[in-house]
Amino acid sequence: MTDIDYGSYLRLEELLALQLPQSQPEHPDELLFIVVHQASELWFKVLRHEFDTLIAALEQFDTMRALLSVQRVNALTEIISQQLAALDTLPPQRFAQFRGYLGSSSGSQSAQFRAIEATAGLRDAHFLQTISEHGPPPAEVQAALERPTLQSLVLALLAHEQVELAALYTGPGPTPLFLLVEGLLEFEQRFARWRFLHVQLVERIIGPGTGGTGGTLGAKYLSRTVAQKFFPELWAVRSAFYGR
């Protein structure tokens, strides 16, 4: 076996050389800004990898493996959300001192983030327009759009098990299928919480009416995304109980 130590296994020399502040002279807060976003992209990579596992389990009607995968998806989403707390320590006046060096870069350009949204189930006209306004969607986003949504896969699993969605909430007790559906809704809630915290962060640093980098609408655009739903049918089954 090749002799690999901690640094070589994790490629730390290369990894730690990837933080390249653009400000001149270098602003002391730009490193934090870069690391939070790079770390988010690394976690996005892991989350997308776990989505592959989840989708494979659902396609094979393997409820227990899908349930375990959803639990990891939720843990990863929480980690991504918690990272934003580091940027809460960035005062507006200090961000303004290096913001101009970001050029046209914007978090909305993250292909991995868009792929996560598409994998989870976003297919509305506004989303499709957003990812195509500067040309064809990135390859990873297009690949996600060509996959079945998580909601459709869960509904197919329920049909395979000959279980009605509403029956998960009226049966004798919690079942693995019930926990799976609730786990997906928990993912949606955690993802929405990440969106909300992102809105709050942007408003705190640049204000609610300030445009974002890359020509975006800043907090105005982000606030619109909080209400987006990946699993409308899984949410609607609740309304059925109270709408009768």
Image: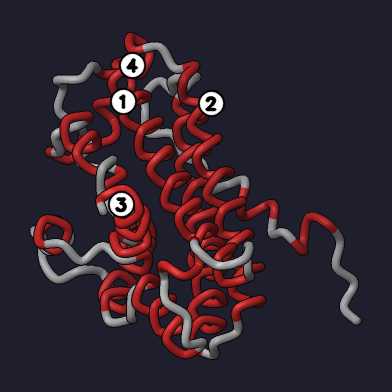
Mark 4 and mark 1: Cα distance apart in space: 5 Å
Which residue lies under the disc numbered 3? 239
Q: Secondary structure beneath disc 4?
A: helix
Where is the C terminus found, in terms of image quarters?
Answer: bottom left
Judging depth in this view, the residue of 75 and 115 nearest the camera is 75
* Dot 2 or dot 1, earlier in sequence: 2
Which residue lies under the disc numbered 2? 86
* Dot 3 or dot 4, earlier in sequence: 4
Is 70 drawn above or below residue 31 in the view shown? below
Q: Are marks 2 and 4 in contact (CB under 8 Å)?
A: no
Amino acid tagged 1 = Val
Left or right: where 137 falls relative to 115: left
* Dot 3 or dot 1, earlier in sequence: 1
Residue beneath the point at 54% across and 35% down: 83
Badge 1 density bin: few <14, some 14–19, many ≥20, Cα 10 Å: many
Q: Secondary structure beneath disc 3?
A: helix
Which residue lies under the disc numbered 4? 204
Mark 3 and mark 1: Cα distance apart in space: 33 Å
Which residue lies under the disc numbered 1? 202
Is 15 drawn above or below residue 226 in the view shown? below
Q: Quadrant of residue 172?
A: bottom right
Left or right: where 202 falls relative to 85: left
